[in-house]
Image: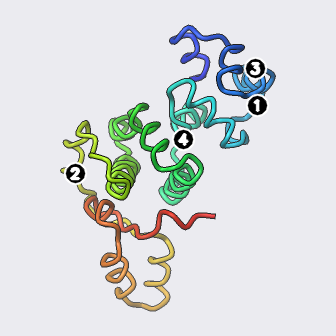
Amino acid sequence: MLINEQLNKIKMTKYRLSKESGVPQATINDICSGKADLEKCASGTLYKIAKVLGLSIETILESSREDIRSSFEVFKSNTCHYVKDMGDLNFIVVILESDEIRKLYDKHWYPEALYLLAMIDYLSRINEIPLCTRYNDLRMSKLEKPIYPVGVLLNSEVLHSDEPLRIAEENAIPEFRRFNIIESEVRNVV
């Protein structure tokens, strides 16, 4: 399990992880032994552990799934929730420190990698933070075909019209549109 590997790598005990993260030691023990299902852990618990270990929540969850890839819509939703839960600046720091974008790209999960990069670039712009230049090579990438939100695709099908697609493209956030990801709302998550 990744958490155990990281603890060994940084020479940290479960007790110290508990103290530094504020997560009860019993919970840490259950997680590290596999008794607790990471998918069912509270996001706050995973966030506290991830922060102390210098990992992203996504990396921890993915390691427990052995590279089971969720749908892109689920990935987008999770990412937006992480931004909401962590706040813009913490999200940027966690993603950049974990190098999650490069890891996803190296696995050939291009939509996910470019979505995260677009999110980082968007959050950097609105918070007036200089762009991280580590991903300049990826910024020249573009998905072959546009990816639209499911709701837009359904609307287009129901209306038998490409008009919803055109409107979605016009209203897309520039950082996402650059990669051929049509995204206009990353803040309104429930």
Please tell me which of labels 4 and 2 falls first in the chain.
4
Does residue 48 appear left or right of residue 94 in this picture?
right
| Image quadrant where one finds the N terminus | top right
* Whether residue 137 is situated above or below residue 2 in the rendered picture: below
Mark 4 neighbour class, 10 Å CA radius: few under 14, some 14 to 19, many 20 or more: few
Q: Is mark 1 on a helix, strand or loop?
A: loop
Please tell me which of labels 3 and 1 falls first in the chain.
3
Residue 137: quadrant of the picture: top left
Please tell me which of labels 1 and 2 falls first in the chain.
1
Q: Nearer the viewer, mark 3 or mark 4?
A: 3
Does residue 75 appear left or right of residue 112 in this picture?
right
Residue furthest out toward the right: 26
Residue furthest out toward the top: 11
> Residue at label 3?
29
Q: Rounded to the nearest whole Å, what is the CA distance between mark 3 and mark 1?
A: 9 Å
Q: Rounded to the nearest whole Å, what is the CA distance between mark 4 and mark 2?
A: 24 Å
For the residue pair 122 and 101, the one nearer the viewer reads as 122
> Residue at label 4?
68
> Residue at label 2?
141
Inspect the image, locate mark 1, and give the three-letter code of the amino acid beneath it: Ala
Inspect the image, locate mark 4, and give the three-letter code of the amino acid beneath it: Ile
Residue 153 is at least partly visible in this image: yes
Q: Is mark 2 on a helix, strand or loop?
A: loop
Res. 36 mark: 1
Q: Residue at x 46, y 91 (%)?
A: 159
Circles 3 and 2 in contact, beta carbons < 8 Å: no
Position of residue 148 measured from the top left corner of the image (x, y, whole percent):
40, 69
Q: Rounded to the nearest whole Å, what is the CA distance between mark 3 and mark 4?
A: 24 Å
Q: Which residue is drawn at 34% across and 67% down?
A: 173
Inspect the image, locate mark 2, and give the three-letter code of the amino acid beneath it: Ser
Res. 84 mark: none
